[in-house]
Image: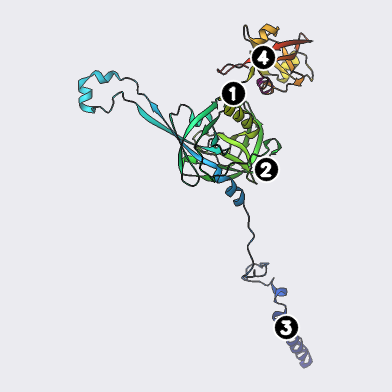
Amino acid sequence: MRKFWLLFAQVTTIGLALFFVINTLKPDLLSGAARTGVITLQESPTRSTDAQPTTTGFSMAAKKVMPAVVNIFTSQEIKRLPSPFMEDPRFRFFFGDEFEDAPRRGSNLGSGVIISQDGYILTNHHVVEAADQIEVALADGRKAKATVVGSDPETDLAVIRINLPDGIPIITFGQSDQARVGDIVLAIGNPFGVGQTVTMGIISALKRSHLGLNTFENFIQTDAAINPGNSGGALVDANGNLLGINSAIYSPNGGSLGIGFAIPVSTAKKVMEQIIQHGSVTRGWIGVAAQDLTPELAESFKLGETKGVLISEVMRNGPANKAGVKPGDILVSVDDKLLADSNAMLEIISSIPPGRISELKLLRNEKEVVVQVKVGKRPKSRGQE
């Protein structure tokens, strides 16, 4: 028994000696030791005090873009309707001239993007619509009066201009056609008038259309927070390159629900260039209304895999009517460009200069018909192509 206790004492002494040596020379080997007595935590070694933290986030992209994004404040005169009570002297006695027919001023706010050292700013049509006074606030706090160069209600885009101070950077245009679902984006604008704000999200979808927002729709959908006041602001990629102009949100209460829409720069550049050169946008038009082909319609017309759009209406004396296009025709292609849907037809025809002769390929009673149409100028009113 004595030998057993002697052996136990020797083993314990050697074990404590090893523990002391390891704890002194290699303490990291014991980092997995229990800390609380409840659970065992695997802790990393203590970070050196002179180590530099790794920089994460998108501060460089935001720093690049924010000076090129402006806040826009507009106002317009609103005339009051004549009140029949104003003829009653008792009404005027109690309420005075508060209800006079004198006009009052309404205000609106939004955002914009500086696109040129010449002072051109790209924004939304609805931001500056009907405004008789426009003030632009730069990111550094300076303010300037702006004038409208031109606008395009059918894409909800407008260009305004200010006397741009020296040293203000302009936006760098990106490649919206190369954007992919899941790409990280930043939305920069002036939500609710609180001041310039940056929010982050991803591209949720591309080429959103048939939303009933504009005549020409090809939206980038994002979950980056976009709220009233963000309209006309920038949607940029992680490198600070412009991908779209924030235009609309899906919301029953006016706040962000993670569904925002931006007009891609591929569309904005075309519209912007025409506005700057001509003050407005000129588009081709043939005078038809069309609807997408559903599987049921395709089956009823015995189209099989044929793509195209159904001509539902032809305007009397319009270009298509003069060329012999009839309601019920299936428009398959324009100048050999196949049509996937009515939105594609709208884009292709509107891009044709008025006066040009174009070839329309139709299906009528299961037979192919080819007609030549002289493209006209699209009217200002909405509704028909």
User: Which numbered disc, 2 or 1, marks the residue that appears first in the sequence?
Assistant: 2
Identified by mark 3, the residue type is Val
Q: Which residue is mark 3?
A: 21
The structure residue drawn at horizontal position 62% and vertical position 27%, both measured from the top left corner, is 217
Q: CA distance from mark 1 to mark 4?
A: 15 Å
Q: CA distance from mark 2 to mark 3?
A: 53 Å
Residue 346: in magenta span:
yes
Nearest to the eye among marks 2 and 1: give it. Answer: 1
Identified by mark 1, the residue type is Val
Question: Could you tell me if the residues under marks 4 and 3 are in contact, i.e. CB atoms within 8 Å?
Answer: no
Question: Could you tell me if the residues under marks 1 and 4 are in contact, i.e. CB atoms within 8 Å?
Answer: no
The structure residue drawn at horizontal position 61% and vertical position 29%, both measured from the top left corner, is 273
Q: Which residue is mark 1?
A: 281
Q: Which residue is mark 2?
A: 183
User: Which numbered disc, 2 or 3, marks the residue that appears first in the sequence?
Assistant: 3
Residue 315: in magenta span:
no
The image quarter containing residue 326 is top right
Q: CA distance from mark 4 to mark 3?
A: 94 Å
Identified by mark 4, the residue type is Gly
Q: Which residue is mark 4?
A: 355
